[in-house]
Amino acid sequence: MSKFFGAGAADRDAVSRPVDDLDVGQVWRAVVARRLWIIIPTLLACIGAAVAVNLLAPRYTAETRIFLQNGDNFYTRPGGAPELQGQIDGEAVQSQVQLIMSRDLARDAIRKLDLVNNPLFNNTDAAVGLVRGLMNAVGIKSQAPAGNSEERALDKFAERLQVFQVGKSRVLAIEFTSEDPDLAARIANTVAELYIGLQQTVKQEAARSASEWLASNIEPLRKRVAEAEARVEDFRAKTGLLLGSGTATLPTQQLADLSSQLAASRTTQSDAQAKAKMIRSMLGAGNLLEIPEVANNDLVRRLTEQRIALRTQLALESRNLLPEHPRIKELNAQLTDLDSQIRMAAERAVRAFESDARLAGSRVESLVAAINTQKQVAVDANENEVKLRALELDARSEREQLEGFLAKYREAQVRDSRDAAPADARIVSRAVAPSAPTFPKKVPIILIATLATFALTSVGVLSLELISGRATVAREEESYGPVPQPMTKATQEPFLTLPAPIDAEFRDVVAPAAMSPEAPPDNAGSSFDVILSKLALPEHKERGRRLFVAEAIVAVGNTDMARALARHLSRNARTVLINLVADKDVGFEEPGLTDLVTERAGFSEVLGREAGSRLHVVAHGTQPSEVLVSDPDAVALSLSALDQTYEWVVCGLSPGLDPAILGAFASRTDGSILVAREGEDEEATLSAYQNLQDLGAQNIVVAVTPVENDGPLHRAA
């Protein structure tokens, strides 16, 4: 159903409102008129500051600097102790700062310099205070504050002493402020010397206490060492775990010797058996003289020589005598006898080797039995040796502890002197009596007091002038014209004469309660809210809502109403404005919707953000408007993509566009707003309303805005 509604509509940025501006001329005139209010207090403050800084007693600050470092060297550092030069970190420096500022060190300095008797540190009149002094002057007795003179001196000393780290270095600055420059320098140097002496004393006391403790523990430790070593020797004697050569015990060494003998006997047995077997095999083959053990035998060698001589004689006799000759037979018999003797000698050698093998075997058996017996002895000895090692470990630990205590005791005795305990700091800059006071700084104090008084009095004069209201003037700040107001009954009646069906419909929508003067919207935002409430657009879970905004008169030729509405919506929701105007009104300079539809640009190129608001804008584009008609599917796809991202898609279209383009958008939106001006041609507005219905627009609302000569809808927003 179409609706017809008369209402004012404009953006919050497109209104004019009275604004109070500061009148600089009036402010200057007020300052000039009340110049004495500024000059007199400023002069008094300057004079008072000058008198005060000259009456105050000057204070001088002396500074001594200390460099923190490890004072131990190769000779004074305990043996094995690491170098601590790089271990003085920021926390250690701050710890030394607190040590220097301690009350114990301050008390030593006060006693050394006898500051208790110095009136700068023990002035009972100053301790009484101004109020108590006045009470005493008028005769009212007032008891002085409790506390002894040393405590008062300590408080004054701590108040004047400053110790701090110089930058990020390991240098400490000791500053002391006093009315006496020589005393300030002496106190700063004394504090530094006492701090270094305190470090030396601490090291010396630590060494002394260590040597005393070590001395009290060395003698008992000596006795424990002697007892532990005696237990080791007694246990060794009882168990027979006497040491042999090296570190092995006798049972272990005997077992090793038996094992060596067994290996040698088995080698001898194998050797003899092999030789006997070889000689016997060669005897069977008849190669007696090829056996080394036989050939090297003296008896065999002599028999061999006789055999050679006998064979020589046999050869000589055989030339003259026949084989059956008695002489030849005799020589052959002698030769056979020699061969028998040689063979018997070889057999004796075989029997000798076999005897050696049997002897070696017997020795092996006896050694195996001895080793088995010695193994049991070694097992028992190993059990005792475990206990012995435990006793030796105890004795060795006691001995090492005693040796360590003795070494540390000697080192502690060496370091138990002031020269052998260097401090972990040294003075790098001693304080001298300062010549210039550090307080009061006369020129800065006078300048600050004068400028502060001048600023305060000036602010007071300006505040009085602003409170009076004379320094502000009202002016009109024009942005886009006056805030549109809802139509009263007087303006509704002559506005438009409509056919009966539409007029009845209009009367249903514009009820007196909704548009009565008693409850008008108070600004442009509330006017937009009234229009949106009349549209009553449903929310879509799957997409955002689309809104169509068009001007009723072609002569208007802009989309200011759409931009103002989109700005209003962007305050609370994600909103995008599609700003389409007629081709004659654009210069085709920046990419926009026409480029998006023709795929000449993407969303990242056509989407822009309006300065000063959260509104995103899609411009017309560089292509002619006809491309929107030639590809309606691309238009629908672009709108669908936008309403998936934004909660509101506002289509601001100029009526100068082709009706086909208007229809492409009007038919795809959830609601339409037709913008008309009060007093315009009613027939033209009615015609535009009917055209929107014919183009397929749904849920139409007509927004009527008041018109001035240069109203908001006649200029680009």
Image (spheres, rainbow, N blue to C red):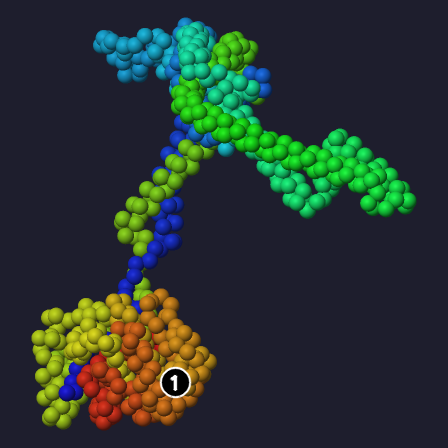
The residue type indicated by label 1 comes to: Val
Residue 622: x %, y % from top left: 44, 84
Assess disc 1: are there few (<14), some (14-19) or many (≥20) residues with their C-alpha within 10 Å of its C-alpha: many
Residue 66: x %, y % from top left: 52, 22
* Residue at x-position 37% and y-position 77%: 618
Element type where label 1 sits in the image:
helix
* Residue at x-position 32% and y-position 79%: 641
* Residue at x-position 70% and y-position 45%: 286
- Where is 313 relative to 617, above or below? above
- Write down the quadrant of residue 642 in the picture: bottom left
Number of marks present in the image shown: 1
Q: Nearer the viewer, residue 575 or 501?
A: 575
Q: Nearer the viewer, residue 457 or 259?
A: 259
From this viewpoint, is residue 200 visible?
A: no
Quarter of the picture containing the C terminus is bottom left
Residue 45: x %, y % from top left: 39, 31
Provide the residue designation for mark 1.
597
- Where is 25 relative to 617, above or below? above
From this viewpoint, is residue 699 visible?
A: yes
- Where is 268 relative to 561, above or below? above
Residue 599: x %, y % from top left: 42, 84
Quarter of the picture containing the N terminus is bottom left
Q: Is residue 20 left or right of residue 487?
A: right
Q: Is residue 562 left or right of residue 105?
A: left
